Image: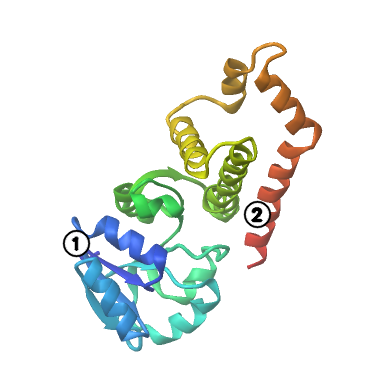
Amino acid sequence: MQTGKITIIGYGAMAQAIGEGLKEKYQIEIVGRNPTKGEEVAKKVKGNFYPLEGFDITGKVVILAVKPYALREVAQKLKGTGDILISILAGKKLEDLKVIPACHYLRAMPNIGAFYNSSFTALAGDKRAMEVGVALFSQIGEVIELEGDNEIDIATSITGSGPAYLGILQEAIEDAGVYLGLKREIASKLARGLFASFGRINEKGGIIKEKVMSPNGTTAEGVFKLQKEGVPGKIMEAIIDGYKKAKRI
């Protein structure tokens, strides 16, 4: 491993978020096909841009942050053998990553929280890669160590896709406030405040519900409606379907 240097292949939103989180502690290399985009991102992360074609990854820690379908194309353009290859590609198995030669492999699934240094990143890979992955992704939030492809495919649907589901829920809560007579900005502030305070509660969902739901109260009425309409089951179905999609990619 080249101490203090991280290579990021790709320059999309997540690549940039990771680079932003690492730039104060590591020297960042941005690698890609488009010099204009690549140099723009490299400047933001205090790094340098290098063309993808013929880029030598020998001895490097590489974070692969491209679209899943581009894996083989990227592999054909690189040369050398990396030290550690870290992939944030949804659905691409550890075995799939071996089209890019490296000594160690790691799958990582950060989420949109990375843009605010509050990602919850799931990791799976060999011991050496895991050590490096924990050190890196701890810079942009919390990490959880998992075992193998199946667990990280599940995590992809929970922590990776989950913010979109919560976004739908937040929007619905806000719309309900407007429907009942609140101004949009007030309803929005209430909804965002709800999610912010909930994020600081370190309790299981059932315990939180018990603490809030009093007999024959307003919360009990709302919970009854959600249960009656099958909302919890639909949430489970969304996560299960997302997991199945990750297995098919």
The residue shown at (46%, 62%) is 88
Amino acid type at mark 2: Tyr
Q: How crowded is the residue under tag 2: few (<14 C-alpha within 10 Å), some, or many (20+)?
A: many
Going by the picture, which residue comes out furthest to the top?
A: 215
Classify 180 as above or below 37.
above
Q: How crowded is the residue under tag 1: few (<14 C-alpha within 10 Å), some, or many (20+)?
A: few
The image quadrant where one finds the C terminus is: bottom right
Dot 1 lies on which element? loop
The residue shown at (31%, 84%) is 36
Residue that label 2 marks: 243
Residue 153 is situated, as x and y percent measured from the top left of the image, at: 58, 54
Asked if residue 94 shows in the view, the reply is yes
Residue that label 1 marks: 3
Amino acid type at mark 1: Thr
Residue 171 is situated, as x and y percent measured from the top left of the image, at: 58, 46
C-alpha distance separating marks 1 and 2: 36 Å
